[in-house]
Every structure is written in C-alpha cells, then in structure tokens.
Amino acid sequence: MAKKKSATTKTAGTGGGAASGTRKPKVTAAADVSRCPKCGSTEREPYHHPRELAQGGEDRDGNAYTHVVWRNTACRSCGQARVDRTYENRLEA
Ligand SMILES: [Zn+2]
C-alpha cells in the first residue's frame, strides 16, 4: 500500500506514441554510391592507384574520419575517368 515508487507509468516521452514500431534502424553507408558524373552509370573499372592522406575531419553526415582516400577509376559505360574519394575511420588501438 505504501509502495508507490513511480508515479509516471505512462509514456515518459514527449507526446509521441503514434509512430511506434515503424522506426527503421539507422545504417551508415560507407560512402556515396560511386557514379559517373557524365552518364550516371555506377558501373566502373576496378580501383587502382589509391592514395591516402592521414587527415581527419568530419564528413557531411558528421561522421568522424581519420583518413581520406582517393582511388582512380573509370566509367565502364562511357569511359569517363574519375577519382573516387572516400573517408575512412581508422581508429588506432
Ligand atoms: Zn559514364
């Protein structure tokens, strides 16, 4: 009878409630899909001549990275050469 611990048995959140269960897990894509700026194709040649720079920062999504890597490739559809840049997070132990 005297055991009244929590008075807030209802939702502790602020308002919500309607959209429960529809929340999708958030995944972080490693990088944008590499796409030819000319024809839009995602088919490309294998990467070669990777260069990297130990430069940290944050990408557009606010994800921290420690290295920037560039790799040469070319579009398989139209042959447009390009360099794909990716951000990598290599946490040193
Ligand atoms: Zn192309």
Image (cartoon, rainbow, N blue to C red):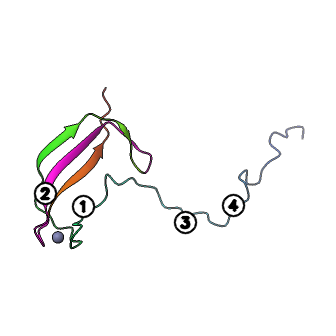
**Marks 1 and 3, how far apart at CA:** 30 Å
Label 1's element? loop
Residue with the most extreme right position: 1
Count neighbours of disc 1 (C-alpha within 10 A) and say few if under 14, some if 14 to 19, many if 20 or more: some
Where is mark 3, residue-wise? 22
Q: In this rendering, would 37 be left or right of 74?
A: right
Query: Which residue is denoted by mark 1 in the rendering?
Result: 34
Q: Residues within 10 Å of mark 4 (few under 14, many from 20)?
A: few
Counting residues from the start of the chain, the first of labels 2 and 1 encountered is 1
Q: Is residue 65 above or below residue 26?
A: above
Q: Residues within 10 Å of mark 3 (few under 14, many from 20)?
A: few
- Disc assigned to residue 16: 4
Magenta region: 61-80
**Separation of residues labelled 1 and 4 (CA atoms):** 38 Å
Crowding at dot 2, Cα within 10 Å, few <14 / some 14-19 / many 20+, comes out as many
Q: Residue at x 20, y 39 (%)?
A: 52
First in residue order: circle 1 vs circle 3: 3
In this view of the protein, which residue sits in the foreground, 4 or 18? 18
**Are the two marked residues, 3 and 4, in contact with CB atoms closer than 8 angstroms?**
no
In the picture, the disc for residue 73 is: 2
Could you say whether the residue bearing mark 3 is in a helix, strand or loop? Answer: loop
Residues marked 1 and 3 touching at CB (< 8 Å): no
Query: Mark 2 or mark 4: which comes first in sequence?
Result: 4
Residue at image position (83%, 45%) is 7
Location of ligand 1 given as a quarter of the image: bottom left
Where is residue 71 shown, x and y percent of the image?
A: 16, 50
The residue at 71%/52% (across/down) is 13
Q: CA distance from mark 2 to mark 1?
A: 10 Å
The reply to whether callout 2 and callout 1 are in contact (CB within 8 Å) is yes
